[in-house]
Image (cartoon, grey):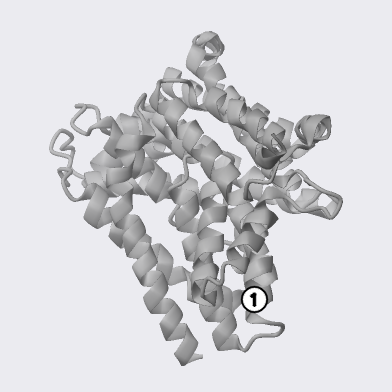
């Protein structure tokens, strides 16, 4: 049976990936499926008790156990916005003022997307759902709207850890990085408009109130959200000053921001606290927590050293691809894309692939090469992440709208193609323009 342990890393990871999708297709809760294959993958690497100990120790890291706390607080926060009536008032005010259903549907997730938060699409999903009061939009399309527009900023927005890490590995000046990456936000908006929003009625015919701006109504829900944003951003900077690393500082700041935002939500609405707290009795609440734990366990199984050299499944896949003689350009495309599919997070695909990518282009590459490589590798990795069933935002949004992720792909494949096409064209432009 030793031959099983020597199967290529890409076969092990790919088989586990397909197994997760199969179990999910068979109606096994996604969190349970991911958790099962994270255990199976650990056994398959032959690391035995050391592999399981590595996974257990990973859960002891503050940045991991705080994630489950934040997910519960986020679920409670969105429930509180509903039970207090704040969300309904804000949606009514925005629909009345903006007069564009497209703008409201896309704008609310995009607004929330300015704040990096774990499974942040779960935060904006209730807003998207509230806009569709007449239930005219199918659940899969609502998942695509919430998920896609929530992620239009992470190509360059400097609050995201993945962006900071990409800047570090590319060694590009911050302004240069922002300038070469910002066009992908425009491409994402265009792709979402063409393939996701196109068949939705553009106007709010059901709410005709003269277009008056109701500041109190808009701020009813957006006020607590703004408080959460401010505390999270400021707290993250303060936490970093006290020696907390970037991710941990962000998470701790998020906890304090959510607690403050919850106090703001219940101000004047104390009777809604009990009804909102009943979300802890719902099965879907705890399935969401299991999902987060499963994703963390799977990530740990990929990062676990499998031999004395410190090699992991991720580095094993890298080395196997390079030994096959695949062209350099294809490797720079495939390694980030596969890393994005497997890890489901920007920080993960950048951390797993950018050291390899920039090692392949050589030390101190010219600005034109660095810019073109960064744009090309990042966007292919990002599309791998966006198409990944390991991406927490994707799966929690599908869980929220009580639909399968498989039906959502038909809406996001088109926008993803627009991004990849933009990546090829812009990378070529940067290669010859700088």
- Total residue callouts: 1
Q: In this view, does 360 lie above or below 302?
A: below
> In the image, is 230 to the left or to the right of 102?
right
Q: Which residue is drawn at 57% across and 54% down?
A: 339
Q: In this view, does 104 lie above or below 320?
A: above
Crowd rating for badge 1 (residues with CA inside 10 Å; few <14, some 14–19, many 20+): some
Percent across and percent down for residue 379 are: 48, 64
Q: Residue at x 22, y 34 (%)?
A: 137
Residue receiving disc 1? 360
Q: In this view, does 73 lie above or below 353?
A: above
Q: Can residue 212 be seen in this view?
A: no
> In the image, is 28 to the left or to the right of 292?
left
Percent across and percent down for residue 282 are: 50, 11
Percent across and percent down for residue 101 are: 23, 44
Q: In this view, does 280 lie above or below 322?
A: above
Please name whichever residue, 434 or 380, is drawn nearer the observer in this view of the structure. 380
Q: Quadrant of residue 369?
A: bottom right
Q: In which quarter of the image is residue 189?
A: bottom left
Q: In which quarter of the image is residue 394?
A: top left
Q: Is residue 329 visible?
A: yes
Location of the N terminus (image quadrant)? top right
Please name whichever residue, 34 or 88, is drawn nearer the observer in this view of the structure. 34
> In the image, is 362 to the left or to the right of 330?
right
Percent across and percent down for residue 375 are: 50, 72
The kind of secondary structure element at disc 1 is: helix
Please name whichever residue, 388 or 181, is drawn nearer the observer in this view of the structure. 388
């Amino acid at each position: 049976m030793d031959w099983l342990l020597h199967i290529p890393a890409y076969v092990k990871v790919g088989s586990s990936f397909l197994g997760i999708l199969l179990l999910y297709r068979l109606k096994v809760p996604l969190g349970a499926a991911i958790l099962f294959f994270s255990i199976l993958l650990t056994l398959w690497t032959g690391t035995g008790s050391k592999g399981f100990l590595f996974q257990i120790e990973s859960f002891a890291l503050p940045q991991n156990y705080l994630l489950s706390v934040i997910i519960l607080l986020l679920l409670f926060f969105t429930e509180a916005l509903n039970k207090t009536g704040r969300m309904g008032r804000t949606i009514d005010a925005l629909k009345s003022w903006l007069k564009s259903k497209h703008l409201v549907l896309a704008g609310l997730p995009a607004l929330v997307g300015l704040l990096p938060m774990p499974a942040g699409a779960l935060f904006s999903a209730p807003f998207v759902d509230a806009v569709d009061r007449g239930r005219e939009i199918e659940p899969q399309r609502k998942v695509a709207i919430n998920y896609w527009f929530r992620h239009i900023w992470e190509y360059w927005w400097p609050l995201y850890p993945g962006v900071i890490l990409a800047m570090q590995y590319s060694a590009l000046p911050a302004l240069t990085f922002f300038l070469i990456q910002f066009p992908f936000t425009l491409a994402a908006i265009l792709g979402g408009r063409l393939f996701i929003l196109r068949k939705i009625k553009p106007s709010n015919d059901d709410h005709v109130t003269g277009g008056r701006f109701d500041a109190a109504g808009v701020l009813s829900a957006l006020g607590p959200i703004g408080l959460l944003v401010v505390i999270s951003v400021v707290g993250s900077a303060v936490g970093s000053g006290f020696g907390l690393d970037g991710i941990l500082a962000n998470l701790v700041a998020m906890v304090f921001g959510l607690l403050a935002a919850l106090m703001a939500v219940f101000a004047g609405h104390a009777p809604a606290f009990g009804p909102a707290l009943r979300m802890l009795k719902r099965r879907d609440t705890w399935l969401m927590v299991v999902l987060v734990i499963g994703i963390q366990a799977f990530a740990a199984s990929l990062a676990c050293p499998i031999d004395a050299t410190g090699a992991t499944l991720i580095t094993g896949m890298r080395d196997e691809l390079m030994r096959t003689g695949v062209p350099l350009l294809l490797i720079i495309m495939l390694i980030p894309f596969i890393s994005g599919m497997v890890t489901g997070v920007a920080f993960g695909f950048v951390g797993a692939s950018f050291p390899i990518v920039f090692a392949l282009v050589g030390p101190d590459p010219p600005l034109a090469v660095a810019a073109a490589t960064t744009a090309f590798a990042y966007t292919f990795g990002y599309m791998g992440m966006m198409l990944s069933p390991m991406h927490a935002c994707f799966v929690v949004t599908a869980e929220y709208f009580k639909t399968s992720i498989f039906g959502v792909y038909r809406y996001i494949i088109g926008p993803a193609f627009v991004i990849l096409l933009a990546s090829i064209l812009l990378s070529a432009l940067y290669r010859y323009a700088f």
